[in-house]
Image (spheres, grey):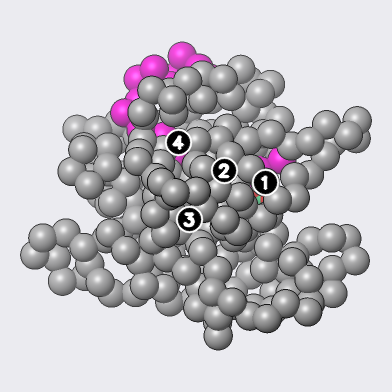
């Protein structure tokens, strides 16, 4: 069977481990580079991307993960994990010395953190999600219940990046006034927002399937690891 690592420096590690195990996969926390060697794929959980960035570098994990990504290891990032997988951030945070937040990268896209704005720190939506259907599986086209918590959206994707899910314009919460610069501004027309993408072996969602009992995204990821999707 496949061994799925969950990057375990910060964030909702246990929920991802439980979801993988409920699907019959083996899931192990990854805190150091040596633990990375034994995994077939890696999940980067939701949490706080600035903290995750600092800790992955402190623990000497950032470069080894980048090398595995370059080598084709399948990686799934949810929420903060999506931010970590993005090549470019629209609004990187900076530490006290002014050093910008870094990502691991791999997905050719621009992600905006905390994009849905402060007035609606969290919201839920039912989304059409591409690529979940397996042969003979009637649930494949059922909508995915998506929970967004201070979630990013994908602002721009490169050529090789496939959009799997969007929040329709009518359901996109409008950001309120954002004195601290969070969110995209109050005067924008509502437009559909990209919240799930795939490029090759990399998968990312703005939302958290691991906290709703939704298992099909993790199922898709396991199929990607097995080379079946
Ligand atoms: N806003 C968080 C960040 O910037 C992500 C939130 C989440 O993972 N739920 O990292």
Q: Is residue 59 left or right of residue 77?
A: right
Pointer 4 or 1: first along the chain:
4
Q: Which residue is mark 2?
A: 86
Q: Which residue is mark 3?
A: 205
Locate the N terminus and report the quarter of the image it occupies: top left
Q: Is residue 35 magenta?
A: yes
Q: Which residues are magenta?
A: 32-50
CA separation in Å, label 2 and label 1: 7 Å
Q: Which residue is mark 4?
A: 6
Circle number at residue 69:
none
Circle number at residue 89:
1
Q: Are marks 2 and 1 in contact (CB under 8 Å)?
A: yes
Q: Within 8 Å: ligand 1 and the Cβ of disc 3? A: no
- Rendered location of residue 21, percent (x, y): 30, 44
Pointer 3 or 2: first along the chain:
2
Q: Is residue 184 magenta?
A: no
- Rendered location of residue 54, percent (x, y): 71, 30
Foreground: disc 2 or disc 4: 2
Q: How many marks?
A: 4
- Rendered location of residue 133, percent (x, y): 21, 63
- Rendered location of residue 102, percent (x, y): 69, 34
> In front here: 105 or 58?
105
Q: Is residue 73 visible?
A: yes
The residue lying at 50 percent from left, 48 percent from top is 158
CA separation in Å, label 3 and label 4: 15 Å
Q: Is residue 179 left or right of residue 32?
A: right
> Seen from this angle, which residue lies furthest top?
34
The residue lying at 75 percent from left, 65 percent from top is 183
Q: Is residue 10 visible?
A: no
């Amino acid at each position: 069977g496949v061994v799925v690592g969950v990057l375990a420096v910060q964030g909702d590690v246990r929920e991802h481990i439980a979801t993988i195990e409920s699907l019959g996969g083996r899931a192990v926390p990854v805190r150091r580079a040596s633990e990375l060697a034994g995994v077939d794929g890696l999940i980067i959980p939701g949490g706080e991307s600035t903290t995750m960035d600092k800790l992955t570098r402190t623990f000497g994990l950032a470069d080894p993960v980048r090398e595995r990504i370059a080598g084709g290891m399948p990686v799934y990032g949810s929420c903060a994990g999506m931010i970590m997988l993005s090549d470019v951030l629209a609004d990187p945070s900076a530490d006290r010395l002014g050093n910008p937040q870094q990502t691991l990268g791999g997905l050719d896209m621009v992600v905006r953190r905390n994009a849905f704005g402060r007035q609606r720190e969290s919201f839920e939506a039912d989304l059409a999600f591409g690529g979940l259907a397996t042969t003979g599986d009637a649930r494949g086209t059922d909508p995915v219940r998506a929970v967004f918590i201070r979630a990013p959206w994908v602002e721009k994707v490169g050529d090789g990046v496939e959009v799997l899910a969007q929040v329709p314009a009518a359901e996109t919460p409008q950001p309120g006034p954002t004195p601290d610069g969070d969110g995209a501004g109050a005067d924008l027309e509502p437009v559909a927002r990209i919240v799930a993408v795939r490029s090759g072996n990399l998968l990312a969602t703005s939302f958290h399937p691991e906290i709703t009992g939704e298992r099909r995204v993790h199922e898709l990821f396991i199929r990607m690891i097995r080379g079946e999707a």
